[in-house]
Image (cartoon, rainbow, N blue to C red):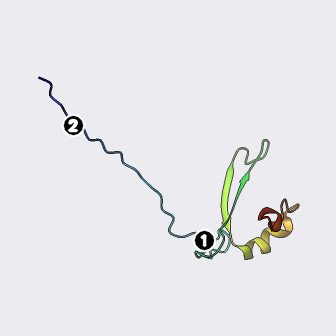
Amino acid sequence: MVNKITVTRFKEITEEVIRSVSCDWCGEEFNETDAINSFSIHFGYGSKYDGDIYYFDICDDCFDKYLKDKASEVIEQRDEYWGE
């Protein structure tokens, strides 16, 4: 005689749900129709931040105010990217 045992296992799943995203400069909350501009900065060898990676979100207005003029060049124009 063979006894069958049924074992049910449950795996606990933790999921992070983003309720809102805001600009890391001004704090303005993005709404569902806004594009969320996310950036990361990877610091290289020899930097005092050697190996660190920083992530941030920025609204269009803060990008224009703080970063646009600091960028060395535009890598790819929007119309080329979207095929327009």
Residue 21 horizontal side relative to residue 16, left or right: right
Name the kind of residue labelled 1 in the image: Ser
- Kind of element beneath mark 1: loop
- Residue found at x 47% / y 58%: 16
Give the residue at x 66% y 71%. Answer: 35
Using a 10 Å C-alpha cutoff, classify the residue at mark 1 as few (fewer than 14 neighbours), some (14 to 19) or many (20 or more): some
Circle 2: element type: loop
Residue positioned 88% across, 61% down in the render: 73
Percent of width and height locating residue 28: 62, 76
Which residue in the protein does label 1 denote?
Answer: 22
Q: Nearer the viewer, residue 65 or 47?
A: 65
Q: Is residue 5 above or below residue 35?
A: above
Labels 1 and 2: the sequence-earlier one: 2
Where in the figure is residue 7, as x and y percent of width and height? Answer: 24, 37
Q: Nearer the viewer, residue 63 or 78?
A: 78
Instruction: Give the number of the disc on residue 6.
Output: 2
Q: Quadrant of residue 64?
A: bottom right
The answer to whether residue 52 is above or below residue 19 is above
Q: Are marks 1 and 2 in contact (CB under 8 Å)?
A: no
Asked if residue 68 is positioned above or below residue 6 in the image, the reply reads below
**Quarter the C terminus occupies:** bottom right
Q: How many marks?
A: 2
Instruction: Judge whether 45 appears above or below 61 on screen.
Output: above
Q: Amino acid at mark 2?
A: Thr
Does 11 sit left or right of 2 as displayed? right
- Residue 52: give x, y in percent of width and height: 69, 48
| Quarter of the image with the N terminus in it | top left
Q: Nearer the viewer, mark 1 or mark 2?
A: 2
Q: Percent x, y for residue 50?
A: 73, 44
The 10 Å Cα crowd at callout 2, few under 14, some 14 to 19, many 20 or more, is few
